Image: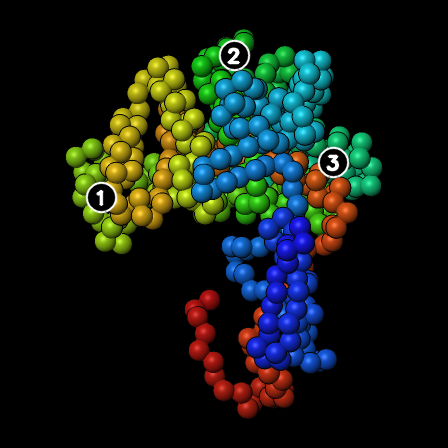
Amino acid sequence: MENDTLTITDNRTNKTYTIPIANGAVRALDLRQIKTGPDDFGLMTYDPAFMNTASCHSAITYLDGDAGILRYRGYPIEQLAEHCTFLEVAFLLLNGELPTQEELEKWNQAVMQRTMIHENVKKFMDGFHHDAHPMGILISTVAALSTFYPDARILSNPLCNRKQIVRLIGKMPTLAACAYRHRLGLPYVYPDPSLSYTKNYMNMLWRRTEPTYVANEVLARALEVLFILHADHEQNCSTSTMRAVGSSNADPFVTTAAAIAALSGPLHGGANEEVLRMLDEIGAIENIPNYIAEVKAGHRKLMGFGHRVYKNYDPRARIIKRVAEEVFEVTGRNPKIDIALELEKIALNDDYFIKRKLYPNVDFYSGIIYQAMGFTPDQFTVLFGIPRTVGWLAQWQELLQDPERKIARPRQIYVGQEVRDFVPITRRAQVEMAAV
């Protein structure tokens, strides 16, 4: 449109500039022309944590936080969670379209045939201490896969890239299951390609002495839905890390390891574990009012409520809430769910939380389900990382195909010392330093 421009008047120079607007954004480099003189670098934007900066064009995930909408490739997350398998959604994220029956069968077979890991990877895992955190093991072993598949560095070959994508999706549950069993001192279980993606993962986790592990259908489907809900979520911390590291042409294994490292931080991947701690601390429904009062007073935080992007009810939370009831019919009712439901009810009707747009997010119920299914809290972030690998790889693949791709290199605003002359050590003043 003719009027899709922004007119800026620089009051320092009284000069006026016209900046084009495209897709609701202006290009930061278009601001570079705004200068006070020939020696001026040009105007920059300052945006800590990228609160209002778009780093890429993407056709993968659409998220409207104000309206509570999440779509993969245009499909509402509610429909995909109800009708699809996880690998079906993975195909969609990577290819842009849902597969035909024939395509899905070939895709399932391709992924499941690559679930086996090299025996030396298991030896590598054995080097970790018995109480090593599963996320630390996962980060390290995914990075180590880079040394087993040197062809992964050939990024100019789309077929080779595709091979690495399938390898990573296939091997991630195997690595995660091995990390789990290593901590318990149990022998590793080989993958069974005849099983579905989630049933195979459950088999590698929980098989003991039985000749054949038979996964409960309800629990396997619940895990399938949880994987679908966590497959991608636009430009979050770990996805941005995937793109930033991938922009240097690092291979997909070390790039994915970097994304897992970002996910391992408690502000990103560990929120559902914090919800469980909060519910344990509350202890009983009758204690909720006092806890809410302490939250309002600023003495405590209400975990599992609010989101950087969502200013409405997280659509994934609604789906998980329904799945929870299905899981409890098999496992027995987790008493934490009753505390959670009452906590949600009070918060959603309290002006304090309504004004702040604090609604339940995906983490509010997921930890309760995982715990009911038999997962320990140290596994929760691993369960996040398995499906999110698909989203990371879809974003990485999209990055490689972007004609505007350049190595990520943010600017900074320097606020340090001006030029200073060197001072000999005998003349330097003592500096107060924190204890090392």
Task: Residue at the far top: name it.
Answer: 211
Q: Label 2, on which residue?
A: 213
Task: Identify the residue shown where x is 71% and y is 44%.
Answer: 399
Closer to us: 93 or 115? 93
129 up-or-down from 96: above or below: below
Residue 238 visible, this angle = no
Number of residues whose C-alpha sits closer than 10 Å to that of mark 3, classed few (under 14), some (14–19) or many (20 or more)? few
Q: Label 3, on which residue?
A: 148
- Mark 1 or 2: the one toward you: 1
Task: Identify the residue shown where x is 71% and y is 17%.
Answer: 103
In x, y percent, where is residue 127? 59, 38
**Sequence-wise, which precedes: disc 3 or disc 1?**
3
**Sequence-wise, which precedes: disc 2 or disc 3?**
3
Q: Amino acid at mark 1?
A: Tyr
Dividing the picture into quarters, in which one does residue 80 lie? top right
**Sequence-wise, which precedes: disc 1 or disc 2?**
2
Closer to us: 101 or 393? 101
Tell me the distance, in whole angstroms, between the alpha carbons under discs 2 and 3: 30 Å
Residue 63 visible, this angle = yes
Residue 324 falls left or right of residue 22: left
Q: Amino acid at mark 2?
A: Tyr
Number of residues whose C-alpha sits closer than 10 Å to that of mark 1, classed few (under 14), some (14–19) or many (20 or more)? some
Q: Secondary structure at mark 3?
A: helix
Circles 2 and 3: CB distance less than 8 Å?
Answer: no
Q: Label 1, on which residue?
A: 291
Tell me the distance, in whole angstroms, between the alpha carbons under discs 3 and 1: 51 Å
Q: Secondary structure at mark 2?
A: loop
245 up-or-down from 436: above or below: above
389 up-or-down from 193: above or below: below
Tell me the distance, in whole angstroms, between the alpha carbons under discs 1 and 2: 43 Å
